[in-house]
Amino acid sequence: MKKENYKIQGLHCASCKIIIESFLLKYPGVENVIVNYTSGDMQIEYDEKQISIQDIKKAVDSLGDYTLLLEDTNVDILRKKELEIKKKTLIFLTIATIPFLFFMIWMLLEMMNMVPMIKDMLGMIGNVNILFLIQFILTTGIIFIGGKQFFISAWKALKKKSFNMDSLVALSTFTSWAFSSAVTFFPQLFSKDVNVFFDAAVFIIFFITLGRWLEAKARYKTNEAVRDLMKLQAKEAIIIVDGEERTIPIEEIQVGDILLVKPGQKIPIDGVVVEGMSSVDEAMISGEPLPVEKDIDSKVVGSTINLTGMLKVRATKIGKDTLLAQIIRLVQEAQNSQPPIQKIVDKISGIFVPIIILVAITTFVTWLLIGKDLQFSIYLATAVLVIACPCALGLATPTAIMVGTGRGAKNGILIKDIQALENARNIKVVVFDKTGTITEGKPKVVIVKYFGSNEDISKSIAYSIERNSEHPLGMAISEYSKTKSSSKDISISDFKNIEGSGVRAKVNGKDVYIVNPKFAATLTKIDPGVQDYITNQQNNGNTLAIQIEGKDISVIYGLNDKVKEDSKLAIQKLHNMGIKTIMLTGDNKVAAQRIADDVGVDEVIADVLPQQKDSAIQEVKEKYQSIVAMVGDGINDAPALARADIGIAMGTGTDVAIDSGDIVLVSGSLLKIVDTINLSKQTMRILHENLYWAFGYNVIAIPIAMGILYIPFGILLSPIIASIAMAMSSVSVVGNSLRLRYVKV
């Protein structure tokens, strides 16, 4: 089964999404289809053995004025061209409707007895009224030239036994035009007071085209975040080959190439500094405003800006593997996913147009049966067809999601699961890992105690073993031993990582362990004096690692990890939101409690092995019976992140576990968790406002268009006013979503 994303050109209403999805799902081999009307993306899952992408393209292209783009096309240029075409059409319609505006103003003046009747002034040609004939000629050109896209789209949909928004527009304008044409050329069939309403057809086409142009411009802005991310990518790089500098396109860079990055230039790809020192602005990736210092062996991210010094960087990730490319992919996937509520909206939108056509027919027949004439009945049926708007329903959810996820990406908050974005506003418990989450994740050796061993040899053994470890404590011991040791490297064998406890290796045929006190107690008998020392150090808040050579304890390392500057403030803000905080750690209870007290965490669950964190999260969920979020580094906490209702993986700007968790925080700041919850609240509030407006508009507007206010108050809704209301309903939904770009997170 293959899963791919493609762009569709020509989507212009919410019904387009439903038609394409339902049509493609009928094909054997097509497993799932999601079309995002707002972004123009189609995500499809299909079996290549049963159906080819060329067959899928033919199916999509046959449905309407759509084109499935298979090649890597610059969609931004296509969108701008579409906007330009809509603009030209709108200019044509604006000029063409001026005569009708003149006729309307003249008629108002007629009603005030300020000017003679224009019908009488122009006179007749035979039995044809010249005013009606002029309007017929103008209207025919306007609706069949300026509005031809509506009829083409409606006809193609009808051939596939489907209806879309264009079906309503085409039906209403054609009905108005056909009735008015009959009145113009066959006046003997009607009473003398029957009038034409060519102007209704004209202004319906004009206002709906205007609405779609405004909507398209607004929708273009909803995807601004992804375009801004794409613009961050460097176009060229300076490569060093045999000591010579050469400028090449970024596409030609290979892994392992050495690149020169001068002050003020963008770092072209992800890599590692091999020479030089500088400050780098990573704000565009992490959302953090302060520059980050870089020197040899520091990781750098493509698209960030080198500020001060000259850097030589070895490329480690290129193309689609770079962090920026992954972020763009992640944002696009999130924007194209659907929250549960969208499925309900889609079902309603799928039957909306046929129902409205039935309602319009019912309105027409009902008023005829009541005793009203043909003109009155057609007038109201036309208003019903025009005012109904499934587009507002279809836009309500995706526009809010697109702007919300884009806003998050700009602030270093990557939403992978839309369900997580929806649920984050209801978080009641946040469980934190300690190392690298509450603390900086860069522990330092602060105390070392030797027990009768050769210090240099013990340090060399520790360095030789721990340099194979990726755990922060092991790396800290390795670094300490390297700087303090005067001995050479020692050959080791059978290195093994003991998950959650430490490491083991053989040195000269003897087992050497560097493990935590709990595991050490299973390997050797610990003397009371040594145990007192261990307890005392733990009471001081130090994390301990014990080196055991054979059966003897040779070294005890005391390590300390500095708490992040903003951890206390973030936890305080979570408390202000009524959220309970828990720290889940493999560290000993005393050291963990000390850090918890420093930052204000409510509860501590200590001495937990990595494989036990999964069940610990389950116990927290059962205890509190509410939405629980787990925050960790996304590497050692993967099972716990998956078990929590919302898994939040934290990175450090340059080292992010993109594939972990439901939400990824590029920055290591816990304040981003607060921002995530606020973003969720704001996004869902806007989304619900959109839905309330879209549903409310149709529930109120359709009965008014049917004439419900005519009998008690004598009020009728003009098809022209109906077209304005319909056009503005979609624009208002998109405009409301765009507010997310400016609200405070």
Image: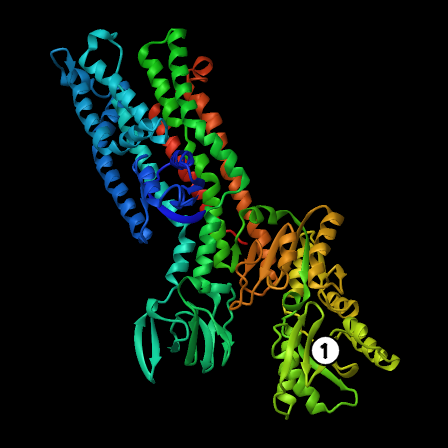
Place of residue 98 in the rendered image (x, y in percent of width and height, measured from the top left): 22, 32
Relative to 538, 570 lies left or right: left
Residue type at tag 1 = Tyr
Relative to 533, 169 lies left or right: left
Residue 190 visible here:
yes
Position of 24 relative to 503 (above/below): above
Q: Quadrant of residue 485?
A: bottom right
Give the farthest residue toward the right. Answer: 528
Name the residue beneath numbered marker 1: 513
Position of 113 relative to 415 (above/below): above
Place of residue 650 in the rendered image (x, y in percent of width and height, measured from the top left): 58, 62
Place of residue 417 in the rendered image (x, y in percent of width and height, measured from the top left): 54, 50
Q: Quadrant of residue 511?
A: bottom right
Residue at the spot 49% in from the left edge and 50% down from the top edge:
334
Give the farthest residue toward the left. Answer: 125
Position of 102 relative to 656 (above/below): above
Place of residue 681 in the rendered image (x, y in percent of width and height, measured from the top left): 58, 47
303, 185: nearer the viewer: 303
Q: How is the image coloured?
A: rainbow
725, 178: nearer the viewer: 178
Q: Secondary structure at mark 1?
A: strand
253, 573: nearer the viewer: 253
560, 493: nearer the viewer: 493
Residue at the spot 44% in from the left edge and 22% down from the top edge:
704
- Give the mark count: 1
Relative to 414, 240 lies left or right: left
Relative to 302, 540 lies left or right: right
Give the farthest residue toward the bottom. Answer: 486
